[in-house]
Image (cartoon, grey):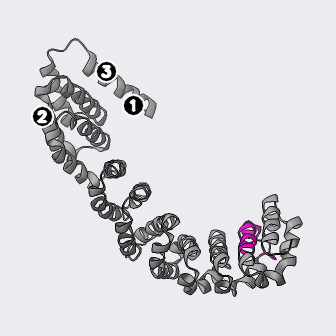
Amino acid sequence: MSFRDRFQNLKETVGQWTDSTGGGSLDRKIERNLAEMEGGTEIERTAAIKALVIQAQTDDKWADPIITSFLRVLPGQLASPQEAIIDGLLELRKVKVSREEEIFESIQETLDSPYPSVRSKVVDIWTRFSLKSDAKASDTIAVLFEMLSDDDKDVRYQTQESLSKILHTVPKVALPELKNAIGDDDWRVTYHSIVLLTEFAKKYPVPSVALAPEVIEAFNSGERLKERAADCIGMLGLANPEAVKPAVPGLIKGLESKSSELRKACATALGRIGSKNGMVVYHAVPRLARALKNDDWYIHVEVVKALGYIGSNKPTLVKPHLDIIRNRTTTGADKNICKAAEWALKKAGGG
């Protein structure tokens, strides 16, 4: 059965349970739906849950019993019914405000759900509610950092997106949490934390520099982290070039990596650092110029831009290589390289 057919099935089933004038009283319909919620197929359970939410809102005497049933069966449900119950509980909490804390505690427990779609949903819910309350945000951040080690990639990226939204609301909490996470034994936690720090550093560059040693250590620790760490080092270097100076030899070496993405990231980082203090990266200039002489045109835009940034800070460092930059203004493999070379030539005082 196709997804479209299953969806139509679900829609028709919900309609039958909620809109039909036959089948007895509302009480009997609710009792039948409560039984179906536990013993039906996944589609039938989901439909029964959706119907129960409507019925609880229709007859207040059923609101508490239905909420209690939802809380009881939530942990053992399949993916689609779990999501339906979570949505239903969020609706019914508006009707029974006194049970809000109990409802949220049960929803939070589904962060351990075996279903990635459910875990992602709860992460998103927790983020939205935390953003409404600074008091809850710091506690939520700690929970979300734990979710960065989730086995499912989609859950990790949802968590990264959520943390990105929350961290800016409590910057004093953010840096200690990021520091701990970057040093985590799980490379996935470190990876996502470096990405988060890179974004955080755009808004809070000066305090973020305090984490430069951790990012440099991650850059030197393994291939899986190098590209993201290079991006972060470059961003931190805009705030304090001296703080990231120990990373420069590794960035220079990265220009010769087998990974074209890493070569680009290293060139970009060197350009950012050099735009603030060309002398910190002066050893990189000949290597960057050499990279323009090979056929690896994929990285040429970032390389000429790096030379332009460094040249804008210390023209004398780039002066011996102006001819190769000038050459690329007309011989670049595409127009983007030519335009970048024209820009770099002007920045470095050669045009």
Q: Position of residue 281 (x, y in %)?
A: 66, 84
Instruction: Judge by depth and name the residue closer to the eye, 124 or 5.
Output: 124
In the rendered image, which quarter is residue 151 located in? bottom left
Instruction: Judge by depth and name the residue closer to the eye, 324 or 119.
Output: 324
Amino acid type of the residue tagged 1 in the rendering: Arg
In which quadrant is the C terminus drawn? Answer: bottom right
- Mark 2: which secondary structure? helix
- Mark 3: which secondary structure? helix
Can residue 2 be seen at all in this image of the molecule? no
Instruction: Judge by depth and name the residue closer to the eye, 257 or 143.
Output: 143
**Residue under the point 31% across and 56% down:** 134
The mark that comes first in sequence, 2 or 3, is 3
Q: Which residue is mark 1?
A: 6
The mark that comes first in sequence, 1 or 3, is 1
Q: Which residue is mark 3?
A: 15
Dot 2 crowding, Cα within 10 Å, few <14, some 14–19, many 20+: some
In the rendered image, which quarter is residue 73 located in? top left
Mark 1 in CB contact with mark 3 (< 8 angstroms): no
Dot 1 crowding, Cα within 10 Å, few <14, some 14–19, many 20+: few
Span shown in magenta:
292-309
Instruction: Judge by depth and name the residue closer to the eye, 305 or 39.
Output: 305
- Mark 1: which secondary structure? helix
- Closer to us: mark 2 or mark 3? 2
What secondary structure do most residues of the magenta stretch adopt?
helix
Amino acid type of the residue tagged 3 in the rendering: Gly
In the rendered image, which quarter is residue 140 located in? bottom left
Q: Position of residue 270 (x, y in %)?
A: 65, 77
Q: Which residue is mark 2?
A: 64
Establish if 109 lies above or below 196: above
Dot 3 crowding, Cα within 10 Å, few <14, some 14–19, many 20+: some
Q: Position of residue 292 (x, y in %)?
A: 79, 75
Q: CA distance from mark 1 to mark 2?
A: 31 Å
